[in-house]
Image: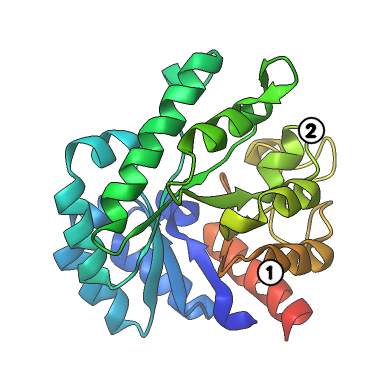
Amino acid sequence: MSDLISIQLYTLRNLGDVDLILDTVAAAGYKNVEGIGSHLDDAAVVAPKVAARGMKMTSCHVGLAALRERPDAIIAACKTFGFIDLYMPAVPPDMRQMDAAGWRAVGKELGDLTERFARSGIALGYHNHHWEMDKKDGDTTALELLFTAAGSSGLAWQVDVAWLVRGGADPKAWMTRYKAIVTAAHVKDIAPAGQNLDQDGWADVGAGVLDWKDLWTACIAAGARHMVVEHDKPSDPGQTARASLAYLRGITG
């Protein structure tokens, strides 16, 4: 199971230099990484750096504006790295409190983009935060509206388990419900109440309150083929990378 593990390089963004970031995750023992949009923009430079360290980029995040404006360049970058799984990480800040019609419109647009990218062999998915758990139409959440509007397009879901919990949702129930479209999960942890306030309340995987031994099994059962370590605001990114991987190796073998 350890071959499913990667790390979202956003976790180490404060290290700045891409070589230092890649050196740090390689030294921690990772073989796979998940990139961000800037890596796609500089794919010809970054891809050889990843490969030189014996690693693969197996998935990547990319923003809505880039999906809209530069689809051909994004597809070419994906092929340069050699991965097929692409995820939109979030709607822009000014869209996060949209009404039901807004979420339906985004879902429809993502469905159309999914079909566009699929013709070039790239699978597009959506990564959640907590605001998609807000109810927008009676008891219907924003996330439900988005997935319904995407229809049969093939839009996938990268489940951010900890953000679901922060949104008051049961991640296992949601993954069971949407099992047909789950292709990845973000593996992150929540610190005990009142702790790690300088890290926005996040924790290294295994050091928080989430039962990741149980959640790991649930994610795999739902269809996740990428298990992506992430911490949104680590105080020591290198230590987070090392400790999280050590914990996951301990529970997965």
Instruction: Report the residue at 17% width, 43% height from top.
Output: 70
Which amino acid, mark 1?
A: Ile
Packing grade of label 2 (10 A; few <14, some 14-19, many >=20) is: few
Q: Is 193 situated left or right of 62 in this image?
A: right
Which amino acid, mark 2?
A: Gly
Closest to the camera, between mark 1 and mark 2, is 1
Q: x%, y% of residue 243?
A: 67, 69
Report which residue position mark 2 lands on.
168
Q: Secondary structure at mark 1?
A: helix
Above or below, 91 against 11 in this view is: above
Looking at the picture, the colour scheme in use is rainbow
Q: x%, y% of residue 73?
A: 15, 52
Instruction: Report the residue at 76% width, 48% height from top.
Output: 171
Q: x%, y% of residue 38?
A: 27, 50
Report which residue position mark 1 lands on.
220
Instruction: Report the residue at 69% width, 58% height from top.
Output: 204
Q: x%, y% of residue 124?
A: 39, 52
Above or below, 207 against 242 in this view is: above
Q: Is 205 situated left or right of 86 in this image?
A: right
Q: How many marks?
A: 2
Above or below, 153 against 29 in this view is: above
Instruction: Report the residue at 47% width, 38% height from top.
Output: 150
Above or below, 47 against 233 in this view is: below
Residue 118 can be seen in this image: yes
Q: Quadrant of residue 91?
A: top left
